[in-house]
Image (cartoon, rainbow, N blue to C red):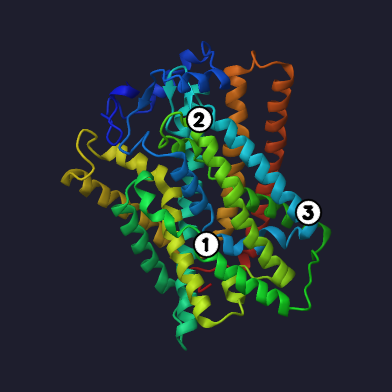
Amino acid sequence: MYMSHTECNPRIIPDLSASSTTHMEAGAKREAMSSSLGTEADQEHNGSAYTIAATAHAVDTDSWQQVGLLLVTSFNCAYVLSFSNLMLVPLGWGWGIACLLIVAAAAWYANWLLAGLHVIDGQRFIRYRDLMGFCLRKMYYITWSLQFSIQLLGNMGFILLGARALKAINVELSHSPARLQWFIPGTGTVFFAFSYLVPTISAMRKWLAMTVAYDVTLLAILVKDGKSNRQKDYGVHGSPAEKAFNALGAVAAILVCNTSGMLTEIQSTLRSPAVRNMRRALAVQYTAGAAAYYGVSAAGYWAYGSAVLEYLPDQLGGPRWAVVLINAAAFLQSVVSQHMFTAPVHEALDTRLQRLHEGTSSRYNLTRRLCARGLVLAFNVLVAALLPFMGDFVNLFGSFALVPLTLVFPSMIVLKINGKSRGRWSRIWHWGIIAVSTVLGVATTAAAVRLIFHNARVYHFFADM
Protein backbone atom coordinates (compact mmCIF):
# COMPACT_ATOMS: atom_id res chain seq x y z
CA MET A 1 0.00 0.00 0.00
CA TYR A 2 2.91 2.31 0.63
CA MET A 3 6.04 3.16 -1.26
CA SER A 4 9.29 4.74 -0.27
CA HIS A 5 9.27 8.49 -0.77
CA THR A 6 12.22 8.19 -3.14
CA GLU A 7 10.25 5.83 -5.38
CA CYS A 8 7.11 7.92 -5.64
CA ASN A 9 6.18 9.93 -8.67
CA PRO A 10 5.01 13.26 -7.21
CA ARG A 11 1.96 13.34 -9.47
CA ILE A 12 0.75 9.74 -9.85
CA ILE A 13 1.68 7.13 -7.29
CA PRO A 14 1.17 3.48 -8.20
CA ASP A 15 -1.93 2.06 -6.57
CA LEU A 16 -0.49 -0.76 -4.51
CA SER A 17 -3.72 -0.91 -2.52
CA ALA A 18 -6.84 1.20 -2.70
CA SER A 19 -8.52 -0.15 0.41
CA SER A 20 -8.37 1.25 3.90
CA THR A 21 -8.10 -2.11 5.64
CA THR A 22 -4.33 -1.90 5.88
CA HIS A 23 -4.77 1.30 7.82
CA MET A 24 -6.90 -0.60 10.26
CA GLU A 25 -4.42 -3.44 10.49
CA ALA A 26 -1.82 -0.93 11.53
CA GLY A 27 -3.43 -1.04 14.96
CA ALA A 28 -1.07 -3.88 15.85
CA LYS A 29 1.79 -1.43 15.55
CA ARG A 30 0.27 1.31 17.65
CA GLU A 31 1.60 -0.01 20.92
CA ALA A 32 5.11 -0.05 19.49
CA MET A 33 5.09 3.58 18.37
CA SER A 34 7.81 5.65 19.92
CA SER A 35 7.71 8.80 17.80
CA SER A 36 7.61 12.21 19.35
CA LEU A 37 7.00 15.60 17.82
CA GLY A 38 10.66 16.49 18.15
CA THR A 39 12.09 13.24 16.81
CA GLU A 40 9.62 13.24 13.92
CA ALA A 41 10.67 16.69 12.84
CA ASP A 42 14.32 15.76 13.17
CA GLN A 43 13.75 12.59 11.15
CA GLU A 44 12.18 14.54 8.31
CA HIS A 45 14.76 17.31 8.46
CA ASN A 46 17.60 14.81 8.25
CA GLY A 47 16.14 13.36 5.07
CA SER A 48 15.22 9.92 6.40
CA ALA A 49 13.21 7.80 3.98
CA TYR A 50 9.49 7.43 4.63
CA THR A 51 6.58 5.65 3.02
CA ILE A 52 3.50 7.32 1.62
CA ALA A 53 0.02 6.14 0.63
CA ALA A 54 -1.10 5.76 -2.96
CA THR A 55 -2.95 8.77 -4.34
CA ALA A 56 -4.03 10.23 -7.67
CA HIS A 57 -3.10 13.76 -6.58
CA ALA A 58 0.24 15.53 -6.35
CA VAL A 59 2.29 15.29 -3.17
CA ASP A 60 5.59 16.80 -2.06
CA THR A 61 5.57 19.49 -4.76
CA ASP A 62 4.68 22.89 -3.30
CA SER A 63 6.61 25.55 -1.41
CA TRP A 64 5.45 26.88 1.96
CA GLN A 65 4.93 30.31 0.39
CA GLN A 66 2.44 28.84 -2.09
CA VAL A 67 0.58 26.94 0.61
CA GLY A 68 0.55 30.03 2.84
CA LEU A 69 -0.97 32.06 0.02
CA LEU A 70 -3.44 29.23 -0.61
CA LEU A 71 -4.59 29.39 3.01
CA VAL A 72 -4.92 33.18 2.93
CA THR A 73 -6.88 32.99 -0.33
CA SER A 74 -9.19 30.20 0.76
CA PHE A 75 -10.08 31.54 4.19
CA ASN A 76 -10.47 35.11 2.93
CA CYS A 77 -13.45 34.05 0.83
CA ALA A 78 -17.01 35.30 0.38
CA TYR A 79 -17.88 33.99 3.84
CA VAL A 80 -15.99 37.04 5.13
CA LEU A 81 -18.94 39.16 3.99
CA SER A 82 -21.10 37.49 6.68
CA PHE A 83 -18.61 37.47 9.55
CA SER A 84 -19.59 40.87 11.00
CA ASN A 85 -23.15 39.64 11.53
CA LEU A 86 -22.27 36.11 12.58
CA MET A 87 -19.35 36.78 14.92
CA LEU A 88 -19.53 40.28 16.38
CA VAL A 89 -23.23 41.14 16.60
CA PRO A 90 -23.95 38.35 19.12
CA LEU A 91 -20.86 39.20 21.22
CA GLY A 92 -20.29 42.95 21.03
CA TRP A 93 -16.92 44.64 21.00
CA GLY A 94 -15.38 43.38 24.24
CA TRP A 95 -16.30 39.71 24.15
CA GLY A 96 -16.14 39.72 20.37
CA ILE A 97 -12.51 40.81 20.10
CA ALA A 98 -11.54 38.51 22.98
CA CYS A 99 -13.17 35.49 21.34
CA LEU A 100 -11.66 36.33 17.95
CA LEU A 101 -8.18 36.27 19.45
CA ILE A 102 -8.66 33.27 21.75
CA VAL A 103 -10.27 31.01 19.14
CA ALA A 104 -7.68 31.97 16.52
CA ALA A 105 -4.87 31.21 18.98
CA ALA A 106 -6.45 27.87 19.90
CA ALA A 107 -6.90 26.91 16.23
CA TRP A 108 -3.34 27.97 15.41
CA TYR A 109 -1.92 25.88 18.27
CA ALA A 110 -4.03 22.83 17.40
CA ASN A 111 -3.03 22.98 13.74
CA TRP A 112 0.60 23.59 14.69
CA LEU A 113 0.39 20.45 16.83
CA LEU A 114 -1.25 18.43 14.07
CA ALA A 115 1.39 19.55 11.56
CA GLY A 116 4.03 17.89 13.75
CA LEU A 117 2.23 14.54 13.41
CA HIS A 118 2.68 14.34 9.65
CA VAL A 119 5.27 11.54 9.84
CA ILE A 120 5.07 8.75 12.41
CA ASP A 121 7.39 5.74 12.49
CA GLY A 122 8.65 6.41 8.97
CA GLN A 123 5.19 6.78 7.47
CA ARG A 124 4.06 10.09 6.01
CA PHE A 125 0.30 10.63 6.27
CA ILE A 126 -1.43 12.52 3.47
CA ARG A 127 -4.98 12.06 4.79
CA TYR A 128 -6.29 12.97 8.22
CA ARG A 129 -8.49 9.86 8.37
CA ASP A 130 -5.46 7.63 7.69
CA LEU A 131 -3.55 9.27 10.54
CA MET A 132 -6.45 8.79 12.95
CA GLY A 133 -7.00 5.20 11.80
CA PHE A 134 -3.31 4.38 12.28
CA CYS A 135 -3.24 5.69 15.84
CA LEU A 136 -6.80 4.88 16.95
CA ARG A 137 -8.34 2.12 14.86
CA LYS A 138 -12.02 3.01 15.27
CA MET A 139 -11.45 6.69 14.47
CA TYR A 140 -10.85 6.16 10.74
CA TYR A 141 -14.51 6.16 9.71
CA ILE A 142 -15.50 8.76 12.30
CA THR A 143 -12.89 11.14 10.90
CA TRP A 144 -13.94 10.29 7.34
CA SER A 145 -17.60 11.05 8.03
CA LEU A 146 -16.88 14.30 9.91
CA GLN A 147 -14.54 15.57 7.20
CA PHE A 148 -16.70 14.73 4.23
CA SER A 149 -19.91 16.05 5.81
CA ILE A 150 -18.42 19.47 6.52
CA GLN A 151 -16.67 19.60 3.14
CA LEU A 152 -19.80 18.78 1.15
CA LEU A 153 -21.96 21.13 3.19
CA GLY A 154 -19.32 23.81 2.93
CA ASN A 155 -19.34 23.39 -0.84
CA MET A 156 -23.11 23.90 -0.85
CA GLY A 157 -22.58 27.03 1.19
CA PHE A 158 -20.06 28.31 -1.37
CA ILE A 159 -22.57 27.63 -4.15
CA LEU A 160 -25.16 29.71 -2.32
CA LEU A 161 -22.66 32.51 -1.67
CA GLY A 162 -21.60 32.58 -5.31
CA ALA A 163 -25.22 32.61 -6.46
CA ARG A 164 -26.04 35.37 -3.99
CA ALA A 165 -23.16 37.47 -5.33
CA LEU A 166 -24.46 37.02 -8.90
CA LYS A 167 -27.96 37.91 -7.78
CA ALA A 168 -26.65 41.07 -6.08
CA ILE A 169 -25.01 42.09 -9.37
CA ASN A 170 -28.29 41.39 -11.15
CA VAL A 171 -30.15 43.60 -8.64
CA GLU A 172 -27.77 46.48 -9.33
CA LEU A 173 -28.04 46.17 -13.11
CA SER A 174 -31.67 45.18 -13.59
CA HIS A 175 -35.05 46.60 -12.64
CA SER A 176 -36.55 43.09 -12.43
CA PRO A 177 -34.02 40.88 -10.61
CA ALA A 178 -34.24 37.12 -11.07
CA ARG A 179 -34.75 34.54 -8.36
CA LEU A 180 -31.77 33.06 -6.53
CA GLN A 181 -32.47 29.64 -8.07
CA TRP A 182 -31.58 30.95 -11.52
CA PHE A 183 -28.03 31.69 -10.37
CA ILE A 184 -27.38 28.48 -8.43
CA PRO A 185 -27.00 26.19 -11.50
CA GLY A 186 -24.76 28.76 -13.19
CA THR A 187 -22.55 28.94 -10.11
CA GLY A 188 -22.38 25.15 -9.92
CA THR A 189 -21.41 24.97 -13.59
CA VAL A 190 -18.50 27.37 -13.04
CA PHE A 191 -17.41 25.41 -9.96
CA PHE A 192 -17.54 22.19 -11.97
CA ALA A 193 -15.46 23.61 -14.83
CA PHE A 194 -12.83 24.91 -12.40
CA SER A 195 -12.62 21.64 -10.46
CA TYR A 196 -12.25 19.69 -13.71
CA LEU A 197 -9.63 21.93 -15.32
CA VAL A 198 -7.72 22.53 -12.05
CA PRO A 199 -7.92 19.02 -10.57
CA THR A 200 -5.66 19.29 -7.51
CA ILE A 201 -4.64 21.73 -4.79
CA SER A 202 -1.16 22.05 -6.27
CA ALA A 203 -2.62 23.00 -9.66
CA MET A 204 -4.27 26.06 -8.08
CA ARG A 205 -0.99 27.98 -7.89
CA LYS A 206 -1.78 30.16 -10.93
CA TRP A 207 -5.13 31.23 -9.45
CA LEU A 208 -3.95 32.53 -6.09
CA ALA A 209 -3.05 36.05 -7.23
CA MET A 210 -6.66 37.22 -6.81
CA THR A 211 -6.30 36.67 -3.06
CA VAL A 212 -7.98 39.72 -1.48
CA ALA A 213 -8.38 42.02 -4.45
CA TYR A 214 -11.75 43.33 -3.32
CA ASP A 215 -10.77 44.07 0.31
CA VAL A 216 -9.38 47.53 -0.39
CA THR A 217 -12.55 48.71 -2.14
CA LEU A 218 -14.74 47.10 0.52
CA LEU A 219 -12.83 48.69 3.39
CA ALA A 220 -12.94 52.11 1.72
CA ILE A 221 -16.73 51.94 1.44
CA LEU A 222 -17.08 50.67 5.00
CA VAL A 223 -14.99 53.57 6.33
CA LYS A 224 -17.11 56.04 4.33
CA ASP A 225 -20.36 54.52 5.58
CA GLY A 226 -19.09 54.35 9.14
CA LYS A 227 -18.17 58.03 9.20
CA SER A 228 -21.56 59.05 7.82
CA ASN A 229 -23.50 56.77 10.17
CA ARG A 230 -23.79 58.81 13.36
CA GLN A 231 -26.23 56.55 15.17
CA LYS A 232 -24.66 53.18 15.73
CA ASP A 233 -25.93 50.63 18.21
CA TYR A 234 -23.34 48.16 19.44
CA GLY A 235 -25.58 46.62 22.07
CA VAL A 236 -26.23 42.88 22.30
CA HIS A 237 -29.98 42.39 22.27
CA GLY A 238 -32.28 39.58 23.37
CA SER A 239 -33.14 37.65 26.50
CA PRO A 240 -30.35 36.15 28.62
CA ALA A 241 -30.99 32.72 27.08
CA GLU A 242 -30.96 34.14 23.54
CA LYS A 243 -27.74 36.02 24.24
CA ALA A 244 -26.08 32.87 25.55
CA PHE A 245 -27.11 30.68 22.60
CA ASN A 246 -26.26 33.39 20.08
CA ALA A 247 -22.84 33.82 21.68
CA LEU A 248 -22.16 30.09 21.36
CA GLY A 249 -23.17 30.27 17.71
CA ALA A 250 -20.74 33.14 17.23
CA VAL A 251 -17.90 31.10 18.77
CA ALA A 252 -18.66 28.25 16.35
CA ALA A 253 -18.62 30.73 13.45
CA ILE A 254 -15.24 32.08 14.58
CA LEU A 255 -13.82 28.54 14.58
CA VAL A 256 -15.24 27.91 11.09
CA CYS A 257 -13.48 31.01 9.76
CA ASN A 258 -10.13 29.89 11.21
CA THR A 259 -9.79 26.19 10.35
CA SER A 260 -10.77 23.61 7.77
CA GLY A 261 -10.33 20.19 9.37
CA MET A 262 -8.12 19.09 6.47
CA LEU A 263 -4.65 20.29 7.42
CA THR A 264 -3.06 16.87 6.77
CA GLU A 265 -4.36 16.89 3.19
CA ILE A 266 -2.99 20.39 2.62
CA GLN A 267 0.34 19.47 4.21
CA SER A 268 0.71 16.51 1.86
CA THR A 269 1.42 18.90 -1.02
CA LEU A 270 4.40 20.50 0.74
CA ARG A 271 8.00 19.74 -0.07
CA SER A 272 10.24 18.51 2.75
CA PRO A 273 10.68 19.42 5.51
CA ALA A 274 6.88 19.35 5.50
CA VAL A 275 6.48 19.96 9.24
CA ARG A 276 8.56 23.13 9.28
CA ASN A 277 7.06 24.34 6.00
CA MET A 278 3.49 23.71 7.16
CA ARG A 279 4.08 25.68 10.32
CA ARG A 280 5.48 28.54 8.26
CA ALA A 281 2.36 28.48 6.08
CA LEU A 282 0.17 28.48 9.21
CA ALA A 283 2.04 31.55 10.44
CA VAL A 284 1.10 33.31 7.20
CA GLN A 285 -2.54 32.31 7.59
CA TYR A 286 -2.91 33.40 11.21
CA THR A 287 -1.12 36.72 10.70
CA ALA A 288 -1.71 38.14 7.22
CA GLY A 289 -4.80 36.03 6.53
CA ALA A 290 -6.45 36.69 9.89
CA ALA A 291 -5.68 40.41 9.59
CA ALA A 292 -7.67 40.46 6.35
CA TYR A 293 -10.82 38.59 7.39
CA TYR A 294 -10.85 39.94 10.94
CA GLY A 295 -10.25 43.45 9.59
CA VAL A 296 -13.27 43.27 7.28
CA SER A 297 -15.39 41.80 10.07
CA ALA A 298 -14.45 44.53 12.53
CA ALA A 299 -14.89 47.28 9.92
CA GLY A 300 -18.37 46.05 9.01
CA TYR A 301 -19.45 45.94 12.64
CA TRP A 302 -17.93 49.38 13.29
CA ALA A 303 -19.72 50.88 10.29
CA TYR A 304 -23.23 49.54 10.94
CA GLY A 305 -23.25 48.27 14.51
CA SER A 306 -25.72 45.54 15.48
CA ALA A 307 -27.80 46.46 12.39
CA VAL A 308 -25.17 44.98 10.03
CA LEU A 309 -26.78 42.60 7.56
CA GLU A 310 -25.95 38.93 7.04
CA TYR A 311 -24.55 39.70 3.57
CA LEU A 312 -22.46 42.86 3.82
CA PRO A 313 -22.66 44.06 0.17
CA ASP A 314 -26.46 44.42 0.51
CA GLN A 315 -25.80 47.29 2.95
CA LEU A 316 -22.98 49.15 1.21
CA GLY A 317 -23.59 52.78 0.40
CA GLY A 318 -20.91 53.14 -2.25
CA PRO A 319 -21.31 53.69 -6.01
CA ARG A 320 -22.93 51.02 -8.11
CA TRP A 321 -19.69 50.06 -9.83
CA ALA A 322 -18.03 49.38 -6.48
CA VAL A 323 -20.87 47.13 -5.31
CA VAL A 324 -20.74 45.24 -8.60
CA LEU A 325 -16.96 44.91 -8.33
CA ILE A 326 -17.12 43.58 -4.77
CA ASN A 327 -19.77 41.00 -5.65
CA ALA A 328 -17.91 39.93 -8.80
CA ALA A 329 -14.67 39.52 -6.84
CA ALA A 330 -16.55 37.61 -4.12
CA PHE A 331 -17.90 35.23 -6.77
CA LEU A 332 -14.46 34.62 -8.29
CA GLN A 333 -12.99 34.17 -4.81
CA SER A 334 -15.65 31.56 -4.04
CA VAL A 335 -14.68 29.61 -7.15
CA VAL A 336 -11.10 29.29 -5.93
CA SER A 337 -11.83 28.82 -2.22
CA GLN A 338 -14.46 26.12 -2.60
CA HIS A 339 -12.05 23.99 -4.60
CA MET A 340 -9.55 23.78 -1.76
CA PHE A 341 -12.18 22.84 0.81
CA THR A 342 -13.62 20.11 -1.46
CA ALA A 343 -10.23 18.73 -2.51
CA PRO A 344 -10.25 15.72 -0.11
CA VAL A 345 -13.55 14.53 -1.60
CA HIS A 346 -12.13 14.82 -5.12
CA GLU A 347 -8.91 13.08 -4.09
CA ALA A 348 -10.79 10.15 -2.58
CA LEU A 349 -12.90 9.69 -5.72
CA ASP A 350 -9.96 10.14 -8.10
CA THR A 351 -7.81 7.64 -6.19
CA ARG A 352 -10.64 5.13 -6.15
CA LEU A 353 -11.83 5.54 -9.76
CA GLN A 354 -8.76 6.43 -11.82
CA ARG A 355 -5.87 4.33 -13.09
CA LEU A 356 -2.97 5.63 -11.04
CA HIS A 357 -0.32 4.22 -13.36
CA GLU A 358 -1.61 6.44 -16.17
CA GLY A 359 -1.16 10.18 -16.45
CA THR A 360 -3.77 12.64 -15.24
CA SER A 361 -4.49 13.56 -18.88
CA SER A 362 -5.20 10.05 -20.12
CA ARG A 363 -8.59 9.61 -21.77
CA TYR A 364 -9.71 7.08 -19.16
CA ASN A 365 -8.79 9.32 -16.21
CA LEU A 366 -10.26 12.43 -17.82
CA THR A 367 -13.56 10.62 -18.33
CA ARG A 368 -13.62 9.34 -14.76
CA ARG A 369 -12.80 12.79 -13.41
CA LEU A 370 -15.55 14.32 -15.54
CA CYS A 371 -18.11 11.89 -14.12
CA ALA A 372 -16.92 12.19 -10.51
CA ARG A 373 -16.81 16.00 -10.50
CA GLY A 374 -20.13 16.16 -12.31
CA LEU A 375 -21.92 13.92 -9.81
CA VAL A 376 -20.56 15.78 -6.77
CA LEU A 377 -21.42 19.22 -8.10
CA ALA A 378 -24.81 18.17 -9.50
CA PHE A 379 -25.83 16.78 -6.11
CA ASN A 380 -24.62 19.90 -4.27
CA VAL A 381 -26.37 22.23 -6.72
CA LEU A 382 -29.65 20.33 -6.35
CA VAL A 383 -29.54 20.43 -2.55
CA ALA A 384 -28.47 24.09 -2.50
CA ALA A 385 -31.35 25.10 -4.79
CA LEU A 386 -33.84 22.99 -2.84
CA LEU A 387 -32.65 24.14 0.59
CA PRO A 388 -31.16 27.64 0.23
CA PHE A 389 -31.09 28.02 4.01
CA MET A 390 -28.19 25.56 4.23
CA GLY A 391 -26.16 28.15 6.14
CA ASP A 392 -27.77 27.11 9.41
CA PHE A 393 -26.84 23.50 8.75
CA VAL A 394 -23.28 24.46 7.85
CA ASN A 395 -23.03 26.07 11.30
CA LEU A 396 -24.39 22.87 12.83
CA PHE A 397 -21.87 20.61 11.16
CA GLY A 398 -19.16 23.21 11.69
CA SER A 399 -19.65 23.04 15.45
CA PHE A 400 -20.26 19.29 15.43
CA ALA A 401 -17.35 18.41 13.12
CA LEU A 402 -14.70 21.13 13.28
CA VAL A 403 -14.41 21.20 17.06
CA PRO A 404 -13.28 17.55 17.28
CA LEU A 405 -11.30 17.63 14.03
CA THR A 406 -9.39 20.76 15.01
CA LEU A 407 -9.21 20.80 18.79
CA VAL A 408 -9.81 17.28 20.12
CA PHE A 409 -8.20 14.80 17.73
CA PRO A 410 -4.63 16.24 17.70
CA SER A 411 -4.41 15.95 21.48
CA MET A 412 -5.81 12.40 21.30
CA ILE A 413 -3.02 11.44 18.88
CA VAL A 414 -0.33 13.03 21.05
CA LEU A 415 -1.60 11.15 24.12
CA LYS A 416 -1.68 7.91 22.16
CA ILE A 417 1.79 7.98 20.69
CA ASN A 418 3.65 10.04 23.30
CA GLY A 419 1.47 10.02 26.39
CA LYS A 420 3.82 8.03 28.62
CA SER A 421 6.96 9.86 27.56
CA ARG A 422 5.79 13.49 27.66
CA GLY A 423 5.40 13.87 31.42
CA ARG A 424 2.53 14.39 33.81
CA TRP A 425 1.84 18.06 33.06
CA SER A 426 1.78 17.44 29.33
CA ARG A 427 -0.82 14.71 29.81
CA ILE A 428 -2.89 17.00 32.02
CA TRP A 429 -2.63 19.75 29.39
CA HIS A 430 -3.87 17.58 26.55
CA TRP A 431 -6.62 15.93 28.60
CA GLY A 432 -7.72 19.43 29.58
CA ILE A 433 -7.88 20.44 25.91
CA ILE A 434 -9.98 17.37 25.14
CA ALA A 435 -12.37 18.03 28.04
CA VAL A 436 -12.85 21.76 27.39
CA SER A 437 -13.18 21.27 23.63
CA THR A 438 -15.75 18.50 24.09
CA VAL A 439 -17.88 20.74 26.30
CA LEU A 440 -17.52 23.55 23.75
CA GLY A 441 -18.53 21.22 20.91
CA VAL A 442 -21.64 20.03 22.74
CA ALA A 443 -22.66 23.60 23.66
CA THR A 444 -22.15 25.07 20.18
CA THR A 445 -23.94 22.12 18.58
CA ALA A 446 -26.90 22.65 20.91
CA ALA A 447 -26.94 26.34 19.93
CA ALA A 448 -26.90 25.44 16.22
CA VAL A 449 -29.77 22.94 16.65
CA ARG A 450 -31.76 25.57 18.54
CA LEU A 451 -31.24 28.04 15.68
CA ILE A 452 -32.51 25.52 13.14
CA PHE A 453 -35.66 24.84 15.16
CA HIS A 454 -36.15 28.56 15.74
CA ASN A 455 -35.94 29.31 12.01
CA ALA A 456 -37.89 26.24 10.89
CA ARG A 457 -41.08 28.25 10.41
CA VAL A 458 -39.49 30.33 7.63
CA TYR A 459 -37.96 27.36 5.78
CA HIS A 460 -39.55 26.26 2.53
CA PHE A 461 -38.24 24.49 -0.54
CA PHE A 462 -36.73 26.61 -3.35
CA ALA A 463 -36.97 29.76 -1.22
CA ASP A 464 -35.74 32.97 -2.87
CA MET A 465 -33.44 34.18 -0.10
* Nearest to N terminus: mark 1 or mark 3: 1
- Whether residue 307 is visible here, answered yes or no, is no
Q: Residues within 10 Å of mark 3 (few under 14, many from 20)?
A: few
Which residue lies at the image location 46% right of the left edge and 28% below the top edge? 273
* Nearest to N terminus: mark 2 or mark 3: 3
Q: Position of residue 396 (x, y in %)?
A: 60, 51
Structural distance between the alpha carbons of marks 2 and 1: 29 Å
Instruction: Indicate whether 176 appears above or below 330.
Output: below
Instruction: Indicate whether 328 appears above or below 54.
Output: below
Q: Which residue is mark 3?
A: 95
Residue farthest toward the top in the current orientation of the protein: 32
SS of the residue under disc 1: loop
Q: Position of residue 429 (x, y in %)?
A: 72, 26
Q: Residues within 10 Å of mark 1 (few under 14, many from 20)?
A: many
Structural distance between the alpha carbons of marks 2 and 3: 34 Å
Q: Which residue is mark 1?
A: 78
In this view of the protein, which residue sits in the foreground, 393 or 261? 261
SS of the residue under disc 2: helix
Q: Position of residue 352 (x, y in %)?
A: 30, 37
What amino acid is found at the position of numbered circle 1 in the picture?
A: Ala
Image quadrant assignment for residue 193: bottom left
Q: Residues within 10 Å of mark 2 (few under 14, many from 20)?
A: many
Which residue lies at the image location 57% right of the left edge and 51% below the top edge? 289
SS of the residue under disc 3: helix
Q: Is residue 44 left or right of residue 303?
A: left
What amino acid is found at the position of numbered circle 2 in the picture?
A: Val
Which residue lies at the image location 74% right of the left edge and 55% below the top edge? 96
Residue farthest toward the right in the current orientation of the protein: 240
What amino acid is found at the position of numbered circle 3 in the picture?
A: Trp
Q: Which residue is mark 2?
A: 275
* Nearest to N terminus: mark 2 or mark 1: 1
Q: Is residue 332 left or right of residue 285?
A: left
